[in-house]
Image (spheres, rainbow, N blue to C red):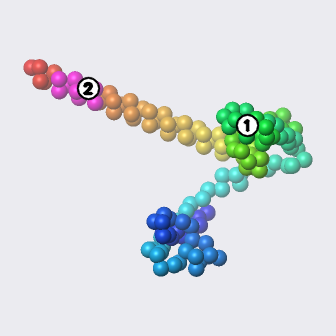
Amino acid sequence: MSSSVIYCLSKLLSWKPWIPAKQLQFLKPWTVGILTQRVLTKDLFSDLVELNEKDLEEQFVRGHGPGGQATNKTNNCVVLKHIPSGIVVKCHQTRSTEVNRIRARRILQEKVDFFYKGESSNIFKQKEEAEKKKQEKRKKAKDNLEKKKNFKEMQNSEIKE
């Protein structure tokens, strides 16, 4: 699936999304130009196992870590438990409870999908593919370093002779 996003250059020389409802605000005389960019979006979560709200147990607890008083006195850490599988996810990535709830559900959905589908899960395949790319990149970097080292040794031996 692909969608088109239109960006326009504003007075501050930064690209901002063009919103049709506010077209008069962005299309003022100081607007330099309009750029259209194709955005390819993958629907990663369409193939995952659907979570039923009846199967979830949600709690809000105090988080930990950096943030000081804002973290220690607010219950914005979300703990989600998927009752049928027993998988528990704890999410305290932001200060917002709502954002943490959404992120916790995504993480839980991925873990439940892997729990039920195993190695045939799309999430598992993507992580495996990313790991292979990372290993190939490391191997190329190591080979390049080895070639440079051999080249320098060869140059040094020619200079000495």
Residue closest to the eye, 12 or 120: 12
Label 2: element kind: helix
Q: Which residues are magenta?
A: 148-156
Looking at this view, name the residue that lies furthest to the front.
69
Q: Where is 45 relative to 132, above or below?
A: below
In the rendered structure, which disc, 1 or 2, sits on the residue that comes first in sequence?
Answer: 1
Note whether residue 89 is visible.
no
Residue closest to the eye, 10 or 107: 10
Per the model, the C-alpha gap separating discs 1 and 2 is 56 Å
Residue 157 lies left or right of residue 39; in this view the side is left
Q: Where is 118 relative to 13, above or below?
A: above
**Residue beneath the point at 56% across and 41% down:** 129
Looking at this view, name the residue that lies furthest to the right.
54
Mark 1, other Cα within 10 Å: few <14 / some 14–19 / many ≥20: few
Q: Position of residue 157 (x, y in %)?
A: 16, 21
Amino acid bearing label 1: Gln
Residue placed under numbered mark 2 in the picture: 150
Residue closest to the eye, 79 or 32: 32
**Residue beneath the point at 59% across and 38% down:** 128
**Residue beneath the point at 84% across and 34% down:** 86
Residue placed under numbered mark 1 in the picture: 69
Where's the N terminus, which quadrant? bottom right
Q: Main secondary structure of the magenta part?
A: helix
Residue closest to the eye, 91 or 111: 91
Residue 136 lies left or right of residue 23; in this view the side is left
Mark 2, other Cα within 10 Å: few <14 / some 14–19 / many ≥20: few
Q: Position of residue 19 (x, y in %)?
A: 61, 72
Label 1: element kind: helix
**Residue beneath the point at 58% across and 79% down:** 24
Q: Position of residue 148 (x, y in %)?
A: 28, 30
